[in-house]
Amino acid sequence: TSYIAVPHTEIFKLYSGLPANQCNCQVHNQCVCSCHDMTKYPDMIVVVGDLSVTIRPVDYMQYDSDPNYGAYCMPQFLSVEHTDKILLGDTFLKRVVSVYDLDKNRIGLARNINEATVDIGNSNGRYFLLPNL
C-alpha cells in the first residue's frame, strides 16, 4: 500500500495535527486539503525502535484534481477497522532502506543515506511510537 494505515479509532489523532484552516477532515474518514502551501503542514516523525524517520508533507500528501473543485491534496493515511496494527506503506518506506529476513521472521530498517533531507528530531513534527520489530 502507499498509505500509512492506522486503526479506525486513531485516524482523527493523525488528522488533528493538520491545520484545520487548510483541511476538511470530516468526509468518510478522509481529509481533503489545500495544496497551495505545503509549509503549513507539519513534518511527522515515525519512531520504530531506535530509528526516527521524518515524513515530510511532500511525502504524505498526494496531489489530485477534480474538474468541479480544482486542485487538492489528500494525506496518505488510511483508516482500517477491526485491527490495532499500524501498516507503514510506501509513504514511510520510501524514506528508509528495508531488509526482510523471512528465515528469521524479522525486518531491518535503516535511514536512506540518499535522502539528504532526512530531518531527525524536528520539534514541529508529530511523533508516532511503534514497538521494536
Image: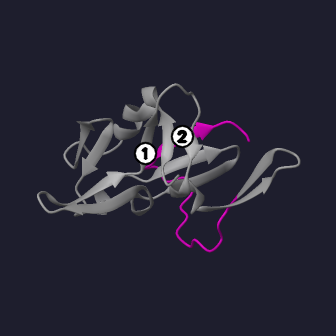
- The answer to whether residue 48 shows anywhere in this view is yes
Residues in magenta, as a range: 110-133
Looking at this rendering, what residue extends furthest in the front direction?
67
Disc sitting over residue 77 in the figure: 1
**Residue occupying the point 44% across, 29% down:** 8
**Residue occupying the point 44% across, 26% down:** 9
Q: Is residue 16 magenta?
A: no
Q: Main secondary structure of the magenta part?
A: loop
Left or right: 32 as drawn, with respect to 57: left
First reached walking from the N terminus: tag 2 or tag 1:
1
- Number of dots carrying numbers: 2
- Residue 109 in the image: state x and y as whole percent: 71, 55
Disc sitting over residue 59 in the figure: none
The C terminus sits in image quarter: top right
Left or right: 103 as drawn, with respect to 108: right
**Residue occupying the point 59% across, 33% down:** 85
- Of the residues tagged 2 and 1, which is closer to the observer? 1
Q: CA distance from mark 2 to mark 1?
A: 13 Å
